[in-house]
Image (tube, grey):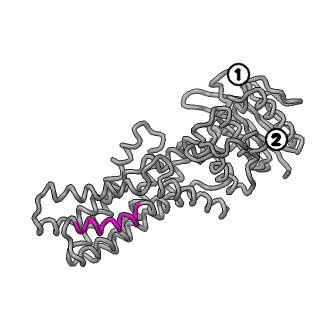
Amino acid sequence: MQAASLTATELVCRKGDRWLFEGLNVNLTAGEALRLIGPNGVGKTSLIRILARLLLPTQGRVAAEGSIAMLDERPALDTHLPLGKALAFWAAIDGQAAATDQLGLTRLLEVPVRYLSTGQKKRAALARLLGQNAAIWLLDEPLNGLDTAGAALTQTLIAQHRAAGGIAVIASHQPIDLPAAAVLDLTP
Amino acid sequence: MTRALWAILRRDLAGLLLGQRRGGGALLPILFFLSVAMLFPFAVGPDEKLLARAGGGVIWVAALLAAILPLDRLVEPDIEAGFFDQWALRGIAEEWVIAIRMIAHWLSFGPALMLASVLAAGLLGLDGAMLGRVELSLLAGTPGLAALGVTVAAVTAGLRGGAALAGLLVIPLAVPVLVFGAGSLIPGGEAGLALTLAASLILCALAPFAGGAAVRAGR
């Protein structure tokens, strides 16, 4: 895996006339993880989208070394297609097959995505995330909808990713086991 | 990068041309186009001269309406499902995606429309020479309509009542293409063809940038 780092300095985010956060700093290097906590609507998703450079912060800078992958509540899979074909689209772009075996999706490959449950869609999105082989993972509520085994698997995957020199930023309300992870409380 | 763009083009063609995404595909706009062309003789009566004179213009109006039909599923579903975000994370510029979508959108209605025009010409009693001029003007003008459609679909994505608004926005913006395109059909109006093509090319050149900027601004 390529060398990874993720730095954000003096981030300010304003949504409409609401100031979500000010003077926020993030500094992560290979193998590190950051957990975002705080009540609903405090700006966790906005921060993740700023770190993904999908949103511009009102002020401040984001610098990232290494490719970035994001997992949120939208799996970005064509709902009318069978799961196998929907994932094959991303495999064609990423140049690597999605890790369907690892996530227990082998039996679902023929099932159209719209018939999958929330947890199964989350597993599919995780398979897409693994296929991207990115150095920096930005995970917004990765455990939502997952069963106990799925949640355990996700934590294992995050641990493996960090052990391989990856970075993970996780916003989660569920208890999640992240050894030696920094915690950032966004509560104002 | 090229590999990714091919994959996106294949997906767009499967979605728009074959109608895998939310039904219809190329068939629905074409049936709509033919039914408008069929309604006209019913409405104005079977006066051959009148039909032959107005027929070319009717085909153009029907083509414009048919191009508007799929606007609401051109861009918005992909933004909602998170596709544009995932493409951006992989360094695929919105401009590329919009340019590809424009090509796929044109392929999904342009050629089929030109084929259906042969039928419509029969319904409206146009002669062979006129049909030739109609086909040429459609070939020059429909890429512009596709570009306009994709741009407006990107601008109105995520707005409440976006689908109706997109139709309303496209109609006035399409007037130049319509005026030149239908104008090229009257005898001595051949210069109109060049102007149709020019308007079309300008729209095609602007659409990826305008559409890409609209997708980014909507985040």
Q: Mark 2 packing: few (<14 Cα in 10 Å), some, or many (20+)?
A: many
Q: Main secondary structure of the magenta part?
A: helix
Pick the front one: A147 or B164: A147
Which residue was labeled with disc 2? A167
Q: Residue at x 49, y 60 (%)?
A: B104
- Image coordinates for residue B17, horizontal then vertical, percent: 47, 58
- Image coordinates for residue B35, horizontal then vertical, percent: 27, 55
Q: Quadrant of residue A26?
A: top right
Vertical position of residue B159 compared to residue A141: above or below: below
Amino acid type of the residue that numbered disc 1 sits on in the rendered structure: Thr
Chain containing the residue with disc 2: A
- Image coordinates for residue B41, horizontal then vertical, percent: 16, 59
Which residue was labeled with disc 1? A187
Would residue B16 be counted in the magenta stretch?
no
Residue numbers of the magenta segment: B109-122
Would residue B120 be counted in the magenta stretch?
yes
Q: Earlier in the sequence, mark 1 or mark 2?
A: 2
In this picture, residue A42 sits left or right of residue B42: right
Pick the front one: A166 or B11: B11
**Residue A121 can be seen, yes or no:** yes
Q: Residue at x 88, y 45 (%)?
A: A164
The Cα–Cα distance between marks 1 and 2, rounded to whole angstroms, is 23 Å
**Residue A60 can be seen, yes or no:** no
Mark 2: which secondary structure?
A: strand
Chain containing the residue with disc 1: A
Mark 1: which secondary structure?
A: loop
Vertical position of residue A24 compared to residue A3: above or below: above
Q: Residue at x 57, y 60 (%)?
A: B10
